[in-house]
């Protein structure tokens, strides 16, 4: 967002040329205000404003007492008092504007300090500590470098036709824990038959029921842990085609053990399901063929489910993709914090721009209002002079390009606006200059 262009500092030095020659004093007769105009002005019909009537009559009386012609750039005592009152009014307007601008600058400095803190926090994010895939402590920058290298390797091997890093659908990964829970009621029901749980009189068979529940929970947890752990561990032995490539020698023992145990767990679950169904079918008086067919069918279903559970863990990517997943989980809160900081910084920068605009508006409005009492004083003096003619028929007027805080007549009446100028400069100074100034002040204090 572009910063508001810096306003030039308004100088209070009079740059308007002074009148060259002043006419010498000379006698001047009395020139009064026509009674008709006094009456119409008292009736608020002009040409003199009712609030100015007494003052203009007093100015005329003063000129009668002076009794000599004055140059246009010379003020009488009463005229000087009116000008002084106009300057005091302008200064009062200036002081009110200073108070408003001070509040804006205070808000600006507070917001600027918060913005500096946010930017410093954002700059520290690359050094924020995170945990690596092997438990080591890394910085965000180091983790990003490692993540980029692993990601490049995965992309390269995948582009070359490798199936090692192939992922399974995320929906299937989320459904696997619920599929494992299906074994719990089935195993409890199977074990209850061994411990003779009477389902019609549970109050008399609490101990067998609790025993069945414990063994069912143990069997379910064992199946889930065995299939998940074995599948994830064997993932590290995948070749480029996605098959298990068992190493040679003693290194072959561990992965081979996990593979055999996985097969036994799947087959054991299927055999248990077949036995239970065939037993219940026989107890119900059904034929052995029907019970065998049904038992084999559900045994295949259970084994297929266990194979799917194992395969999801085995075929879902590789050790490299698991490392990328770990890095992503570590970087996610950092990235979220980074986005929050960037959003907050953007809001703070917009707030600074709004305060700059508000300060410039207060500055311009104050300068415009400061000229009102000065010009009002000049208008009173001009109208009085138009009647008494004590200083000639000419009037020295300020050029139209003069500063807005000047009056109408020469010599110009100036009001010190340095406080307003400095406050506006504080709002419009670039950030790099602010930082440099702050560093310089700190060095001087040190």
Image (spheres, rainbow, N blue to C red):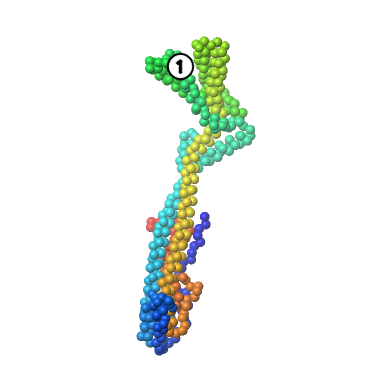
Residue 122, given in percent of the width and then of the height, sits at: 47, 47
Q: Is residue 317 above or below residue 344?
A: above
Q: Is residue 10 above or below residue 313?
A: below
Find numbered disc 1 in the image and state the secondary structure of the residue it sits on: helix
Residue corresponding to mark 1 = 191
The answer to whether residue 408 shows anywhere in this view is yes
Residue 245, given in percent of the width and then of the height, sits at: 58, 25
Q: Taking 288 as reference, is 77 left or right?
A: left
Residues packed near mark 1 inside 10 Å, few (<14), some (14 to 19) or many (20 plus): many
Q: Residue at x 46, y 65 (%)?
A: 364
Quadrant including the C terminus: bottom left
Q: Which quadrant of the view contains residue 55?
A: bottom left
The answer to whether residue 79 shows anywhere in this view is no
Q: Which quadrant of the view contains residue 358?
A: bottom left
429 and 132: which is toward the camera: 429
Residue 128, given in percent of the width and then of the height, sits at: 46, 42
Residue 359, given in percent of the width and then of the height, sits at: 45, 61
98 and 59: which is toward the camera: 59
Q: Is residue 193 above or below residue 240?
A: above
Q: Residue at x 43, y 74 (%)?
A: 375
Q: Residue at x 52, y 29 (%)?
A: 175
Q: Residue at x 44, y 63 (%)?
A: 362
193 and 402: which is toward the camera: 193
408 and 125: which is toward the camera: 408
Badge count: 1
């Amino acid at each position: 967002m572009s910063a508001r262009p810096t306003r030039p500092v308004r100088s209070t030095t009079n740059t308007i040329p002074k009148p060259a020659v002043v006419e010498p004093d000379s006698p001047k007769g009395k020139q009064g205000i026509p009674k008709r105009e006094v009456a119409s002005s008292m009736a608020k019909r002009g040409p003199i404003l009712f609030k100015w009537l007494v003052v203009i009559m007093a100015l005329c009386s003063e000129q009668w007492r002076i009794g000599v012609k004055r140059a246009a750039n010379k003020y009488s005592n009463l005229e000087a008092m009116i000008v002084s009152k106009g300057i005091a009014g302008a200064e009062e307007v200036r002081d009110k504007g200073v108070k408003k601008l001070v509040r804006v600058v205070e808000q600006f400095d507070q917001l600027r300090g918060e913005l500096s803190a946010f930017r410093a926090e954002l700059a520290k994010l690359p050094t924020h500590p995170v945990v690596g895939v092997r438990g080591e402590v890394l910085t965000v920058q180091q983790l990003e470098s490692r993540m980029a290298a692993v990601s490049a390797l995965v992309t390269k091997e995948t582009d070359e036709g490798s199936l090692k890093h192939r992922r399974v659908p995320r929906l299937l990964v989320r459904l696997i824990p619920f599929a494992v829970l299906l074994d719990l009621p089935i195993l409890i029901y199977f074990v209850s038959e061994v411990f003779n749980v009477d389902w019609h009189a549970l109050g008399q068979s609490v101990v067998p029921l609790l025993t069945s529940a414990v063994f069912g929970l143990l069997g379910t947890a064992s199946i889930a842990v065995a299939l998940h752990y074995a599948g994830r561990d064997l993932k590290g032995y995948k070749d480029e085609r996605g098959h298990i490539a068992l190493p040679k020698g003693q290194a072959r023992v561990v992965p081979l053990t996990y593979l055999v145990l996985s097969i036994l767990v799947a087959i054991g679950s299927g055999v248990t399901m077949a036995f239970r169904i065939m037993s219940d079918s026989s107890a119900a008086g059904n034929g052995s063929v029907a019970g065998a067919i049904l038992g084999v069918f559900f045994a295949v279903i259970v084994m297929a489910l266990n194979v799917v559970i194992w395969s999801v863990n085995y075929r879902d990517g590789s050790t490299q993709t698991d490392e990328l997943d770990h890095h992503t989980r570590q970087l996610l809160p950092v990235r979220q914090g980074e986005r929050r900081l960037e959003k907050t910084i953007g809001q703070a920068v917009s707030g600074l721009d709004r305060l700059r605009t508000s300060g410039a508006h207060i500055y311009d409005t104050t300068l415009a209002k400061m000229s009102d009492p000065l010009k009002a004083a000049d208008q009173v003096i001009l109208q009085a002079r138009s009647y008494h003619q004590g200083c000639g028929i000419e009037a020295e007027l300020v050029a139209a390009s003069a500063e807005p805080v000047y009056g109408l007549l020469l010599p110009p009446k100036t009001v010190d606006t340095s406080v307003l100028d400095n406050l506006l400069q504080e709002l419009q100074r670039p950030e790099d200059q602010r930082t440099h100034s702050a560093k310089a002040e700190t060095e001087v204090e040190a």
